[in-house]
Image (cartoon, coloured by chain):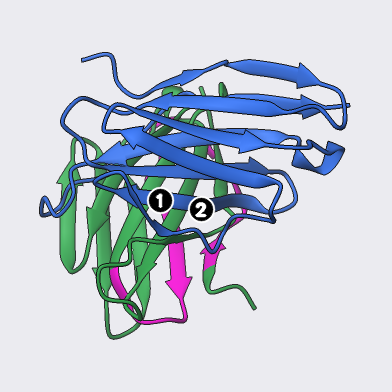
Chain colours: A green, B blue
């Protein structure tokens, strides 16, 4: 079993729909990242969070430390949101160690 | 700011050859990461540096891989000798060390194909 699990693996939705991507992890963490990888391959870090919720434009990320679960939400989805979204965690086992462990990603396709 | 710069963007080489990938982090960033992405294994951390010092190299596949950071503005990842299974996209990323909430900034990647 992977330490970081994402669901769904693939998601296709109509433009304007509300999108939710889930990430569950099995280890204690100090922080969690959400990354976006565009079809061209470039990777952008969207959020880094260790508690609560963060919002940036139409993107919202939440984390529940007790349940070891995070969600990424996209409101009013747009075709340009089509990308692979990757969850990554920093384990809490080694103080100061910033090693990221990655999920396998969720491929999101927004249809006009 | 130009962002994280990687070179070359694409590399095609033959098995057994030495490959050197280069990374220039964002000016002022003092933490640098090398990642590898393949279809089979997804993204994996290979090694990271803080203040030019290697902190965790547990992800480096084997002795054929080596990474250096001679100064704050330059790092290399070397594969010698290269093998077909090394074919992947290699990303470099940088960030401010210990800046609360600071995310990592990724370079465009180097797409390596070993024939």
Drawn side of residue A40 relative to residue B54, left or right: right
Examine the rendered structure and indicate whether residue B11 appears above or below residue A4. Answer: above
Check contact, mark 1 vs mark 2: CB within 8 A: yes
Q: How far from the left and from the top, in percent, is residue B70?
A: 36, 34
Residue at the disc numbered 2: B45
In the rendered structure, find residue A97 and report the number of the disc placed on it: none
Chain letter belonging to callout 1: B
Pick the quarter of the image with the C terminus of chain B. top right
Co-location on one chain, circles 1 and 2: yes
Residue farthest along the left direction in this orientation: B100
Q: How far from the left and from the top, in percent, is residue A66?
A: 28, 85
Drawn side of residue B6 relative to residue B104, left or right: right
Residue farthest along the front direction in this orientation: B70
Q: Residue at x 54, y 64 (%)?
A: B58
Q: How far from the left and from the top, in percent, is residue A36?
A: 43, 38
Q: Residue at x 21, y 66 (%)?
A: A50
């Amino acid at each position: 079993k992977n330490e970081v699990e994402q669901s769904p693996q693939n998601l296709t939705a109509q433009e304007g729909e509300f999108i939710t991507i889930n990430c569950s992890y099995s280890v204690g963490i100090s922080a969690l990242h959400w990354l976006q990888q565009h079809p061209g391959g470039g990777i952008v870090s969207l959020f880094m969070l260790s508690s609560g919720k963060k919002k940036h434009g139409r993107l919202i990320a939440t984390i529940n430390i007790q349940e070891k679960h995070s969600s990424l939400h996209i409101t009013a989805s747009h075709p340009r949101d089509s990308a692979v979204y990757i969850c990554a965690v920093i384990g809490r086992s080694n103080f100061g160690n910033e090693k990221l462990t990655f999920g396998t990603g969720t491929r999101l396709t927004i249809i006009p | 700011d130009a962002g994280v710069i990687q070179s070359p963007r694409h590399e095609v080489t033959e098995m057994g050859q030495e490959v050197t990938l280069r990374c220039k982090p964002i000016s002022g960033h003092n933490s640098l990461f090398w990642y590898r992405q393949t279809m089979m294994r997804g993204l994996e951390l290979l090694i990271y540096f803080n203040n030019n010092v290697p902190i965790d190299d547990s992800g480096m596949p084997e002795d054929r891989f080596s990474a250096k950071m001679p100064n704050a503005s330059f790092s290399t990842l070397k594969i010698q000798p290269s093998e077909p299974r090394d074919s992947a996209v290699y990303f470099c990323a940088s960030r401010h060390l210990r800046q609360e909430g600071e995310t990592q900034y990724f370079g465009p990647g180097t797409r390596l194909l070993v024939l």
